[in-house]
Amino acid sequence: MQHWFSRVEDTLVVEDVGLDSIAAEFGTPTYVYSRAALTTSYQAYASACKGRRARVQYAMKANSNLAVLQVFARLGAGFDIVSGGELKRVLAAGGDPATVVFSGVGKSAAEMKMALDHGVRCFNVESIPELERLNEIACRAGATARVSLRINPDVDARTHPYISTGLKANKFGIAFEDALAAYRIAAALPYLEVTGIDCHIGSQITELAPYLEALDKVLDVVEGLEREGIPIGHINVGGGLGIVYANETPPDITAFATTMLDRVAARGHGHREVLFEPGRSVVGNAGVLLTRVEFLKPGCARNFCIVDAAMNDLSRPAMYEAYHRIEAVRPGHARAVKYDVVGPVCESGDWLGRDRVLAVQPGDLLAVMSAGAYGFAMSSNYNTRPRAAEVMVDGGSFHLIRERECVNELFVRERLLPV
Ligand code: LLP
């Protein structure tokens, strides 16, 4: 547990604020983030980049709350976006569109136009039809689109199959073997300017080896391009660095970033700018999901601890069988029992943790740990459940950064049929 989440007189606190006071003020379920934790993990990347040609593009899909983006924008981060909606969030948070790289396999014409109008730094392009569409949109807009091609290096990131992206069988990127041909097409299109190369092999990666393997392949492509007179200004090495949910042992952020930068320099590419696109490793361990126990339901096969957060609030366990530690905010005197911690949603897949030993009783608060990344961002209104509130702790104070939704607004856009 990072030291921003600690115990003071038995109560779980975030920085200097007890999670019980946050629940008392804003109710549950509520996502709670630590500004100091966000800042520290960002700074771990920034310190590795210091004195080098390198910068951090926060992959905002992991957590796109405006206040979170604002914290990173103020620290000098750029952003990795995957939709026009995310670009609007960057603008609303006071971020600079000139620091934005636009990723994703299916950018619409409207999204391309909007990103061009705002002067984004670069489009990370994933196919030849996408190059052609972008060229056409840029032509109509009287603009030049800066592009990087996402190379699929066919490297196994050795992570969950749903979050592995750098294999031939994945939908992402342009096959390593086809890279030179695709770059020739890009370089010949009149409204495109080739500026870089990118690659992203997966998420929750806990080893350095797949990164270095992918980086070497990307650098091979860069050298091939150089021989053809297609200059590459920046190398975007993607995101994906894993965090500790249970007992994983990922490299620490600074060691990871330094290793990558050293390899780039060792291969004679130190003059090019390196971009990192981290999401999870900067926000994952900066947030928890605060929830309250509704009922305990002992059974002959399993005991259930039914809480007020569900798979619609945190879908990672249901989707990836992901493990999140679960802690009582204030351990009471109840008997310790092994429970499956489940939500109220009508699905057997609605669980947050299995086989957890907890000493709890109805009304107690639990914290689902390491929920800052792909938590709220992937939440839904399934079962007509309003999405949770979000709170940012900053030292001894805390701020509501997203109000809890109310039920009426969930169907405000729906229409009854005429009779
Ligand atoms: N860059 C690109 C092009 C990406 O597709 C992603 C994540 C990132 C950067 C950031 O990766 P990170 O540093 O966060 O690993 N919902 C899943 C994770 C999906 C990751 C999608 N792409 C989960 O909850 O585990």
Image (cartoon, rainbow, N blue to C red):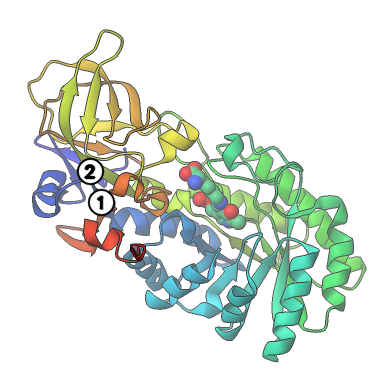
Query: Residue 290, labelled with which disc?
Result: 2
Q: Residue furthest front?
A: 419
Query: Residue 266, labelled with which disc?
Result: none
Q: Is residue 252 visible?
A: no
Location of residue 252 in the rendering, given as x and y in whole percent from the top left corner: 49, 44
Residue 160 located left or right of residue 244: right
At numbered mark 1, what does the secondary structure look like: helix, strand or loop?
Answer: strand
Q: Residue furthest bottom?
A: 142
Number of numbered labels in the structure image: 2
Q: Amino acid at mark 1?
A: Val
In this rendered view, identify the residue nearer to me: 119 or 226.
119
Location of residue 98 in the rendering, given as x and y in whole percent from the top left corner: 55, 79
At numbered mark 2, what does the secondary structure look like: helix, strand or loop?
Answer: strand
Q: Residues within 10 Å of mark 2 (few under 14, many from 20)?
A: many
Residue at point 25%, 21% (across, down): 304
Q: Is residue 291 above or below residue 341?
A: below
Q: Are marks 1 and 2 in contact (CB under 8 Å)?
A: yes
Q: Quadrant of the N terminus?
A: top left
Location of residue 105 in the rendering, given as x and y in whole percent from the top left corner: 66, 59
The disc, 1 or 2, on the residue closer to the chain's N-terminal end is 1
Q: Is residue 411 above or below residue 159?
A: below
Q: Amino acid at mark 2?
A: Leu
Q: Quadrant of the C terminus?
A: bottom left
Q: Is residue 8 visible?
A: yes
Residue 355 located left or right of residue 359: right
Which quadrant holds residue 119? bottom right
Ligand 1 within 8 angstroms of badge 2 C-beta: no
In this rendered view, identify the residue nearer to me: 141 or 217.
141
Residue at point 26%, 47% (across, down): 4
Query: Residue 32, labelled with which disc?
Result: 1
